[in-house]
């Protein structure tokens, strides 16, 4: 109601009937980065084309670099009209609602205060960013004369890694083991985003077992790091030698005898 009666009687929330400043359009672009850069963080150049404040006149539109207030509206961009006992605000007919008067137009933008240009923006991507995340760069969107410049949104696309995966802030990796290593136990070197770590595999480890190495994952947004999750994958060979077959058959025979003994013990 305040805005309604303010518009009618010339008062209200906007002093002197001033128009709300315009805002430039937001822009969106995309950038593709590697898995490692997404984990560690990186600064990338992004090339965009936009309407920007004229560099020659500072966006004023005047050769002097300073836009003079419109003498008709006093720089508010609006004038009041009285119709009987009512007063209405409308756009200033002299400046078209901009509130500015260009006395000596800029030779580059011809008084518009805006130039269409292509430029490179350096965008800082924080470590731990996810695929599809949007980064907001304030004031790098479209510009309008006498108004607020919009923002630039950069959509981040993260490439897949041939070795690593990701679950939230945890780094995942598969660790291949031979059948004998899984049965007898071993120590394996597991890659990370930095130097490898050694993981002890106990005897009798089954395929699919996950070993957690704390603090060797991906940086978290609020500090700290996730963990490394190493999943054991027991490799079963498709081709074996005669000697290997004989040994495995002997093992199967021993397994059968052991199973029979257990069955007799439980009977």
Image (cartoon, rainbow, N blue to C red):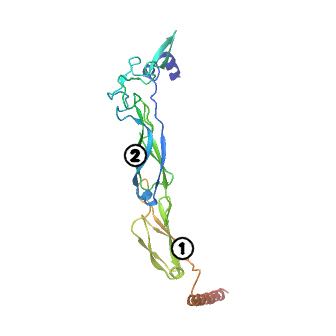
In this picture, residue 33 sits left or right of residue 253: left
Q: Position of residue 76 (x, y in %)?
A: 42, 22
Compared to residue 78, the image places residue 129 above or below, namely below
Rate crowding at label 1 as few (under 14), some (14 to 19) or many (20 or more) other CA atoms within 10 Å.
some
Where, by quadrant of the figure, is residue 38 drawn? bottom left
Q: Secondary structure at mark 1?
A: strand
- For residue 219, say whether it is visible: no
Residue closest to the eye, 129 or 114: 114
Compared to residue 17, the image places residue 137 above or below, namely below
Pick the quarter of the image with the C terminus: bottom right
Marks 2 and 1: which is nearer the front? 2
- Residue sitting at the far top: 84
Please tell me which residue is depicted at 54% across the width and 76% down the height of the picture: 234
- For residue 195, say whether it is visible: yes
Compared to residue 87, the image places residue 40 above or below, namely below
Q: CA distance from mark 2 to mark 1?
A: 45 Å
Q: Position of residue 148 (x, y in %)?
A: 42, 33
Residue position for label 1: 233
Disc on the earlier residue, 2 or 1: 2
- Residue sitting at the far right: 267
Q: Return the mark for residue 82.
A: none
Q: Secondary structure at mark 2?
A: strand
Rate crowding at label 2 as few (under 14), some (14 to 19) or many (20 or more) other CA atoms within 10 Å.
some
Tell whether label 1 touches label 2 (CB within 8 Å): no
Please tell me which residue is depicted at 48% across the width and 36% down the height of the picture: 25
Q: Position of residue 90 (x, y in %)?
A: 49, 19
- Residue sitting at the far left: 64
Residue position for label 2: 121
Residue closest to the eye, 49 or 93: 49
Q: How many marks?
A: 2
Q: Position of residue 150 (x, y in %)?
A: 45, 37
Compared to residue 228, the image places residue 30 above or below, namely above
């Amino acid at each position: 109601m305040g805005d309604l009666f303010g518009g009618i009687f010339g008062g209200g929330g906007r002093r002197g009937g001033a128009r709300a400043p315009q805002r430039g359009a937001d822009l969106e672009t995309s950038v593709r980065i590697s898995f490692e850069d997404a984990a560690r963080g990186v600064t990338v150049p992004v090339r965009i084309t936009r309407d920007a404040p004229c560099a020659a006149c500072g966006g004023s539109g005047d050769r002097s670099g300073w836009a003079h207030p419109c003498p008709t509206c006093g720089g508010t961009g609006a004038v009041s009209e009285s119709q009987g006992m009512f007063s209405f605000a409308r756009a200033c007919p002299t400046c078209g609602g901009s509130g500015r008067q260009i006395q000596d137009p800029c030779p580059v933008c011809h008084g518009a205060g805006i130039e269409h240009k292509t430029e490179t923006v350096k965008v800082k991507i924080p470590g731990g960013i996810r695929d599809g995340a949007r980064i907001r760069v304030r004031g790098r969107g479209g510009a309008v004369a006498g108004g607020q410049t919009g923002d630039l949104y950069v959509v981040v696309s993260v490439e897949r890694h041939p070795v690593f995966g990701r679950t939230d802030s945890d780094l995942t990796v598969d660790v291949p083991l031979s059948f004998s290593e899984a049965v007898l136990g071993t120590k394996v070197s597991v890659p990370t985003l930095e130097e490898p770590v050694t993981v002890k595999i106990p005897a009798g480890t089954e395929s699919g077992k996950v070993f957690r190495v704390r603090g060797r994952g991906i940086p978290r947004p609020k500090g700290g790091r996730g963990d490394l999750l190493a999943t054991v994958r027991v490799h079963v060979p498709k081709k074996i030698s005669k000697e290997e077959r004989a040994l495995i058959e002997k093992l199967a025979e021993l397994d059968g005898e052991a199973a029979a003994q257990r069955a007799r013990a439980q009977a």
